[in-house]
């Protein structure tokens, strides 16, 4: 039984993978986690199953379980059963002073695992691990190299574990440049121990998410499980059905064994791509990258161009997640928030705490909310191009993305609320344009992808002409020669480096990753990384009696657009946007009370002081500096946000809605609309690219993602990003 309940190291994702690996050897496993989230210290449902467990594996921290739950753990231990403990389990409990279970705050660490919590070395450090003297013949060390490196910063445990313990591995702290820190003592990092009740224990103070990517550590864990069960460890660890690549301490993407043998889209090895000279190489497969690939393949069918694309993430799902018939809203939310591929980078950025980077083929379009309003003509006032310059590309984008306002049109809920808005001070309220294919399958043409994703771009491209695609391949540096793009240096998930040559490079890696690549490449441009903008997002939930609406009730998808005087827009979604706005094979009961959600987006001033820069003190596993973010709202921004609050309240009143969750402002980054860090413009001192998305001064180097948008309007950026990507490709083809 695996028990994962802590908030530091994402054990709720790493331990299930170890459990799956154990199942390859015939084990039957159960994984328990805190409920409803790891942040709840007082509830781990299912602990009664310990009564039948042969082994308990703990990765816990600071729990305060009630006695009726804790007794299952105590009873298991006192039966003399084996235990494995990871890292924070040495301080697994934190009962308040005077509580009957307070002694277990230290007893679990010292008496069960062999060491208490004392301290750890710096978060920026990592650990060099080596086999302890005289321990080489221990069965847990079968197949373990004499030395290996892990991301975990070293725990200081001396003078523990007790002398009767057998120390297997020692560790020494190393600094971020992988140099041993001579000021640190060598400390035990793995040992076996017979606990106070006579049960065998294996303890390791390692367990950072990136550690589970290190083969030696995974082998160590699997050996320990076999040893604890009194089974001979395997000579080698089987390749599991899932891999666990990480980034910045967080699991970042889905798993790769099936993508290597049974891909649902043709893949090309990085080794083969490194032997190819490409006419165009696209970095990233989200909205901008997917649109660029489709347009290239559509417009160059007979030109014989060699086109390639690389994606930092893996193959995850072959469609928008809402199209999957096995998903309901709960499963969908768990999917898009899973740190295996949604890296919560906002944890590192106090000014931008809501940010996530989603790495998978298709990017965020695998879960986006499909809203596709255009920017208004007035929004282009500060752009180097006009609304008219983009109209034809908007039309092309809307056609390929199946943008329509008909999703809720005609329902009594939609029409009644629109009528109330029109006569309540919002005459421009309209059907919300969404990227949804409402056509039915007919005459053999299948329309199964109702909700649009970039995978549809790739499918169209694949049926126009061949292209090369590699996943799990991260661009770390753009190469240039004599002021021209020459290719990209890439690193694979197993840390192998390659160079892919290309005459034209299109960066579509994201508003954060594109400037990071450019800055790491020393590409000149004082505005690269600057002018970070977002959409301050205000959400609210309201209710209304169902009896106010005739049949057929249907749902609602309403847009109140921005205007010259209204520097924001908002949407109304219902009924019950979390449960009834879309669903698959569920029975939905009639509700007496209808629930609707307001989702408001404000514009902010583009300011150079809002920016991303490279952090000289922190690097990722590929040696690339991490980003730092500086961001704030100006007084003008705050005034606009206040107007948005007031407008939402006025709209609710006009429709007869009552708030049950009043309007609130999301933290910066949660909107997923960040833009501007490589914004277009005519002046290189205030922009990173020209009006076609080409980096100033570098021939053949282009940007086609949200980062190129000045985003001076309140509309969701995806449609505009796609339109601009199509325009950029047309320009590239004109030049060649």
Image (cartoon, rainbow, N blue to C red):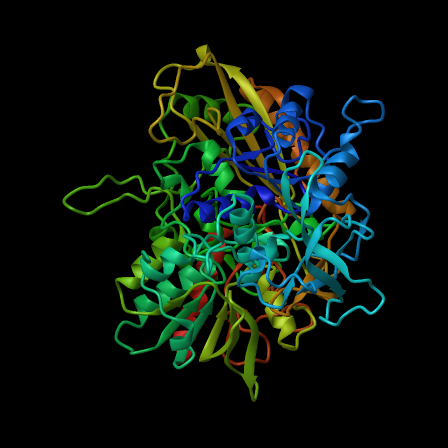
Picture residue at 48% right of the left edge, 32% below the top: 330
Residue 679 location, x and y as percent?
A: 60, 64
* Front-lying residue, 169 or 556: 169
Where 88 sits versus 108, above or below? Answer: below
Residue 341 location, x and y as percent?
A: 52, 51
Residue 729: quadrant of the picture: bottom left
Q: Is residue 496 visible?
A: yes
Residue that lies at the very extreme toward the bottom in this rendered image: 482
In this picture, residue 280 sits left or right of residue 89? left
Q: How many marks are shown on the rendered structure?
A: 0
Residue 695 location, x and y as percent?
A: 57, 74
Residue that lies at the very extreme toward the left in this rendered image: 443
Residue 6: quadrant of the picture: top right
In this picture, residue 358 sits left or right of residue 322? right
Residue 625: quadrant of the picture: bottom right
* Front-lying residue, 29 or 645: 29
Residue 723 location, x and y as percent?
A: 44, 58
Q: Which quadrant of the figure contains the C terminus?
A: bottom left
Picture residue at 45% right of the left edge, 69% below the top: 282
Q: Is residue 716 visible?
A: no
Where 685 sits versus 401, above or below? Answer: below
Where 217 sits versus 648, above or below? Answer: below
Picture residue at 70% right of the left edge, 44% below the top: 88
């Amino acid at each position: 039984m695996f028990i994962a309940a802590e908030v530091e190291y994402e054990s709720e994702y790493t331990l299930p993978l170890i459990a799956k690996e154990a199942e390859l050897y015939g084990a039957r496993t159960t994984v328990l986690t805190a409920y409803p989230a790891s942040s709840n210290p007082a509830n781990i449902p299912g602990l009664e199953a310990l009564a039948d467990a042969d082994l308990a594996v703990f990765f816990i921290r600071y729990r305060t379980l009630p006695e009726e739950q804790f007794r299952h753990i105590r009873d298991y231990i006192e039966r003399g059963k084996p235990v494995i403990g990871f890292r924070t389990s040495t301080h697994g409990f934190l009962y308040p002073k005077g509580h009957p279970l307070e002694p277990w705050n230290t007893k679990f660490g010292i008496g069960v695992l062999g060491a208490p919590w004392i301290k750890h070395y710096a978060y920026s450090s990592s650990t060099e691990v080596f086999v302890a003297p005289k321990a080489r013949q221990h069965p847990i060390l079968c197949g373990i190299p004499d030395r290996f490196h892990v991301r975990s910063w070293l725990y200081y445990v001396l003078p523990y574990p007790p002398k009767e313990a057998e120390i297997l591995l020692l560790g020494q702290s190393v600094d971020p440049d992988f140099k041993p820190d001579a000021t640190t003592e060598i400390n035990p990092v793995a040992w076996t121990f017979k606990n106070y009740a006579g049960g065998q224990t294996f303890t390791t103070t390692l367990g950072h998410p990136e550690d589970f990517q290190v083969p030696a550590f995974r082998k160590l864990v699997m050996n320990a499980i076999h040893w604890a069960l009194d089974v001979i460890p395997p000579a080698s660890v089987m390749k599991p059905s899932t891999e666990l690549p990480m980034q910045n301490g967080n699991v970042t993407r889905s798993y790769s064994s099936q993508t290597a043998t049974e891909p649902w889209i043709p893949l090309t090895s990085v080794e083969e791509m490194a032997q190819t000279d490409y006419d165009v190489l696209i970095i990233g497969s989200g909205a901008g990258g997917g649109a660029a690939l489709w347009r290239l393949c559509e417009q160059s069918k007979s030109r014989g161009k060699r086109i390639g694309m690389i994606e930092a993430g893996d193959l995850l799902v072959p469609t928008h997640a809402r199209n999957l018939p096995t998903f309901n809203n709960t499963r969908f939310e768990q999917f898009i928030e899973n740190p295996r591929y949604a890296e919560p980078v906002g944890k590192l950025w106090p000014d931008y705490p809501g940010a996530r980077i989603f790495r998978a083929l298709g990017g965020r379009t695998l879960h986006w909310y499909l809203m596709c309003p255009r920017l208004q003509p007035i929004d282009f006032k500060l752009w180097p191009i006009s609304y008219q310059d983009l109209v034809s590309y908007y039309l092309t984008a809307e056609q390929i993305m199946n943008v329509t306002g008909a999703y809720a049109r005609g329902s009594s809920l939609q029409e009644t609320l629109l009528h109330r808005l029109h006569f309540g001070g919002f005459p421009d309220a309209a059907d919300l344009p969404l990227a949804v294919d409402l056509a039915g399958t007919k005459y053999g043409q299948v329309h199964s992808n109702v909700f649009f994703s970039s995978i549809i771009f790739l499918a169209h491209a694949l049926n126009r002409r061949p292209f090369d695609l590699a996943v799990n391949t991260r661009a770390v540096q753009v190469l240039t020669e004599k002021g021209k793009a020459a290719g990209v240096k890439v690193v694979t998930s197993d840390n192998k480096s390659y160079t892919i040559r290309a005459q034209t490079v299109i960066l579509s890696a994201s508003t954060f990753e594109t400037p990071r690549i450019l800055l790491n490449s020393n590409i000149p441009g004082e505005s690269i990384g600057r002018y970070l903008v977002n959409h301050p997002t205000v959400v609210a939930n309201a209710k209304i009696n169902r009896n106010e609406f005739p049949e057929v009730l249907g749902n609602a998808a309403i847009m109140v657009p921005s205007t010259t005087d209204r520097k924001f827009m908002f949407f109304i979604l219902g009924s019950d946007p979390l449960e009834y706005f879309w669903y698959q094979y569920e029975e939905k009961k009639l509700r007496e009370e209808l629930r609707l959600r307001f989702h408001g987006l404000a514009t902010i001033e583009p300011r150079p002081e809002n920016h991303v820069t490279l952090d000289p003190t922190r690097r990722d596993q590929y040696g690339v500096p991490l980003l730092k973010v500086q961001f704030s709202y100006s007084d003008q921004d705050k005034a606009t946000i206040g107007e948005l609050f007031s407008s939402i309240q006025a709209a609710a009143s006009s429709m007869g809605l009552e708030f049950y969750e009043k309007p609130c402002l999301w933290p910066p980054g949660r909107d997923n609309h960040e833009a501007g860090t490589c914004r277009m413009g005519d002046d290189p001192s205030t922009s990173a690219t020209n009006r076609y998305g080409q980096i100033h001064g570098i021939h053949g180097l282009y940007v086609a993602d949200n980062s190129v948008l000045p985003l001076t309007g309140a509309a969701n950026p995806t449609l505009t990003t796609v339109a601009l990507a199509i325009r950029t490709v047309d320009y590239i083809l004109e030049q060649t």
